[in-house]
Image (cartoon, grey):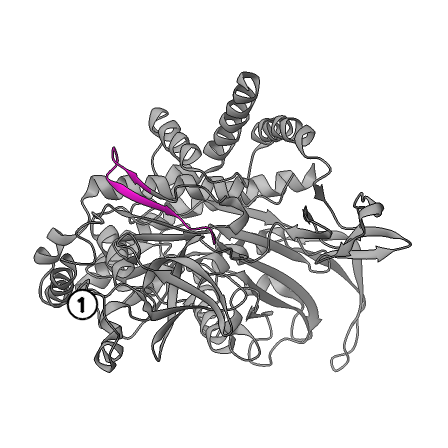
Amino acid sequence: MRGLQVSLNQTQKIRLQRALETLESISSKANSDASVVVADTIPLNYEDGVLKGHGTLDLYGEVVATICGVVERVNKLIYVRALRARYKPEVGDIIVGRVTEVAPKRWRLDINYSQDAVLMLSSMNLPDGIQRRRTAVDELNMRTIFEENDVICAEVRGFQHDGLHLQARSQKYGKLERGQLLTVSPYLVKRRKQHFHHLEQYGIDLILGCNGFIWIGEHVDPTEDMMVEDPINKSEQKGSKFEGSFGNQVQERIYTPLETRQNICRTANAIRVLSILGFIMSVEVIMETVSLSISLNIDVHEMLGSEFCVLTAEKEAERRTSSKKRG
Amino acid sequence: MKGLSVGEKLFIEGGIAQDLRTDGRRRLTYRPISVETDVISQANGSARVRMGGTEVIATVKAELGRPNAMQPDKGKVSIFVDCSPTAEPTFEGRGGEELATELSVSLERCLLGGKSGAGAGIDLSSLIVVEGKLCWDLYIEGLVVSSDGNLLDALGAAIKAALSNTGIPKVNVSAEASANEQPEVDVSDEEFLQFDTSGVPVIVTLTKVGRHYIVDATLEEESQMSSAISISVNRHCHVCGLTKRGGAGVDPSVILDMISVGKHVSEQLLNKLDSEIAAAEADEEE
């Protein structure tokens, strides 16, 4: 069993073991030769010629894996993609990151990659929405758009000579507020058509960043987000700062409504449980976990307990078995 | 610890004001606690305690030594804490030293009683072998393996668990030596004496964020704190120690209020911890 961070009693251990075995038996047939551990031989077709890539080693005429992961083949190149590694960006990925530095004409972002990503001032829409050349004044006012430590959402544009570049040329990208950021292993988030999810029944936004940063927050309408609302948002924010120092009655009003907050916390804990168990995050699985917890009438903080962890594993095993049968 | 954006800070503060924190807990709810005993075989007693993302290891090592001339009938106990850089990169080198000293001083205040050793959670007179000549020195060491807030409470709990796991070898004083000489001893490696740990207090830290206070704050919540008060409470609901961190002032009436809340919370924590320690020791015997 994996090194789980929850303490289980004897029956829970057996139940979890059984659920994990079921999951393993389903998955192993499909791609058993694709996943390797250290010192596994990678089967090859020598006639085509081989280019050994990352995580492989030539040992006595055989190509052997030096890390645990999944074997990837691109034409002649063979490499092993490690599972628990840092995020490896691909062009077009939607990511969530945190601003680490405001530099000349650019922001630097921590996106769990081996180097910081760069978001140029010129590769994002201005708050006023007008397309024009960025002036020196714009550059001076960069902190009114994003400050240090702000959490923002953007898209991977590509590699340039000075590193990884991002872009945020749409209204759906930008600063994320009123919510919480979770970090999971990047391999748990698969690339999909849709990474922005508005869960209408709960009134929350869920952004599954490809880099394993997941944002869960109060829903904001993208149409009025950056272009029109921003100056008002800004003033509201400034107002709240002042009110905070004067009186709490005023501040109470601008807090996230309790019901929405409950939904945010419940979803967050569902993601935490899935991350502990190492299950792939998709919006369907997350929502199923959330509704499982609601249907069992489990308190939000009890979702992180061992019992719910086992229940989730059993549920997932059941779900995958049934979907396999149908398929 | 990475910084938080304004929106996140507001979200955390709002959650505490609305009694629903970011991980769904109420203000006075602890994260799940798990205890493992006898994790380090070289030590006389050891325990690993996990509280959510916080993980600490405490060990107790007993060595024979000479008692202090001022207190010939008492043994000696000292507490050291080390913050490992695996917990946070900033602890690398001497980076963790400041926090480690702060933690060990607070722990000494909370657990060891006065200078004379009177009223300590550990009964020092039980450590004496030959009065004035030979006693056990207990070296209690805490190691922070991963840090997600509330380190002091976790260390306190780990030390309590480690002490209840500790076996002190039985010592047979073989020959009666003259007044100036050290007596000859024979340390048994089969017979061990257990400690009475019922008097060891638990530590409850109440962290004040905004107008409210919370127990078991995570690292993110701790970054928003104005001040924190750690109260150590024993089985009889008596306050054994009190330390305050953070520069912000607290009204005395609020402190009294926090103490009574802390006492109430500590009772639940003690029961929870005792059952966890018992379960861990039962696990170990299997």
Q: Residue at x 68, y 31 (%)?
A: A28
User: Based on the displayed image, in which of its 4 quarters is residue B185 positioned?
Assistant: bottom right
User: Based on the displayed image, in which of its 4 quarters is residue B258 positioned?
Assistant: bottom left
Q: Label 1 is found on which chain of the structure?
A: B
Residue A185 makes an appearance in the image: no
Q: Which residues are magenta?
A: A197-211
Which image quarter is the N terminus of chain B in?
Answer: bottom left
Q: Position of residue A303 (x, y in %)?
A: 41, 37
Q: Position of residue A183 (x, y in %)?
A: 45, 53
Q: Position of residue B179 (x, y in %)?
A: 74, 79
Above-or-below relation of B85 to A17? below
Name the residue at the top extreme: A326
**Along the horizontal axis of the image, is A64 left or right of A82?**
right
Q: Residue at x 19, y 60 (%)?
A: B211
Residue A84 makes an appearance in the image: yes
Above-or-below relation of A185 to B251? above
